[in-house]
Image (cartoon, helix red, strand yellow):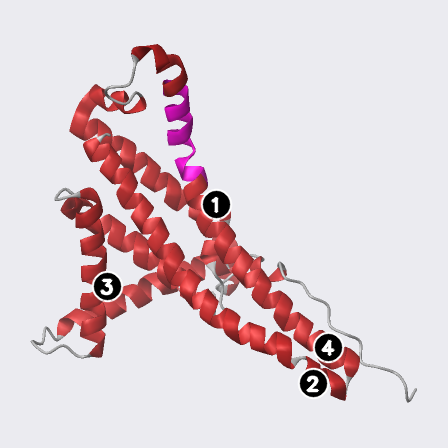
Amino acid sequence: MGNARVAAPTIDALGQFTLSTGLGPIGAAVNFTNANEMMLLAAVLILAALHYGSRARAVVPGRLQALAEIGYEFVRNMCLDTIGEEGRDFFPFVFTLFFFILVGNLLGLFPYFFAFTSHIAVTAVLALSVFILSIVVGLRYHGLHFFTYFFPAGAPKALAPVLIPIEILSFLSRPISHSVRLFANIVAGHVMWEVFAGFMLMLTAGLGTAGLFVSIVPLAINVVLVGFELLVAFLQAYVFAILTCLYLHDAVHLH
């Protein structure tokens, strides 16, 4: 009995992505999950930050007002620089997408919270909304001339049987790559985080006192991963938003 060791914990890296029912019996009745709770919380946090950040309207802004203004200018400049002057019309949509994804990514970094952007169903709906909007915008601006997008101007007509299928396939793959990129990066980061945290606990439980010293290595890696995850949270929201702007640019200006 003196040589018995504490059983090492197991690593369930994918368990953190399990959906559960939120709001008790009411949530169960309407299939309201923890992902829906986080989406609602993200919306409330964004609206609260914008409301209180813009309420003062001070000439010398405070921290919250400065943060709101920086976020506004950042997305606005992204739309104008990428889409052109027409980007003003799409600014509210891109702004909403960017901050909804950003806050969703950041919420997943807190204990007992849930990253709703780690589910392909969520990212696929966001990507499809961008895809459908780009088609609607293209038809609104150009009518049936929009379909010339699939055959670049100036290309030899003899290449049409090759170029048109390639362009169509590339166009239809947009929502797939758009959604999978965000989903895969968030999942990969959280899995790495969970694995190194579990590895640290396994060393501590399996090696006793010596494990406390050996586990410093995975602990240090986890600290680095926190900074990496913060970077990924912002970067993936930015990539999703900038690709949205690029797709809308193509719809407005064709080639």
Q: Position of residue 133 (x, y in %)?
A: 28, 37
Q: What's the CA distance linking mark 3 and mark 4?
A: 43 Å
Q: How many marks?
A: 4
Residue at position x 28%, y 31% in the image: 135
Q: Which residue is mark 4?
A: 203
Amino acid identity at mark 1: Val
Residue at position x 41%, y 38% in the image: 175
**Label 3, residues with CA under 10 Å away: few <14, some 14-19, many ≥20:** some
Q: Earlier in the sequence, mark 3 or mark 2?
A: 3
Q: Position of residue 99 (x, y in %)?
A: 31, 59
Residue at position x 58%, y 63% in the image: 192
Residue 71 is tagged as 3
Q: What's the CA distance linking mark 4 and mark 2?
A: 7 Å
Amino acid identity at mark 3: Gly
Marks 2/1 in contact by CB < 8 Å: the verdict is no
Q: Which residue is mark 2?
A: 212
Q: What's the CA distance linking mark 3 and mark 1?
A: 25 Å
Marks 4/1 in contact by CB < 8 Å: the verdict is no
Query: Chief secondary structure of the magenta span?
Result: helix
Frontmost residue, 235 versus 90: 235
Whether residue 40 can be seen here: no
Residue at position x 7%, y 76% in the image: 59
Amino acid identity at mark 2: Leu
Q: Position of residue 107 (x, y in %)?
A: 43, 66
Q: Earlier in the sequence, mark 3 or mark 1?
A: 3
Magenta residues, start to end: 164-176
Q: Residue furthest right?
A: 1
Frontmost residue, 47 versus 156: 156
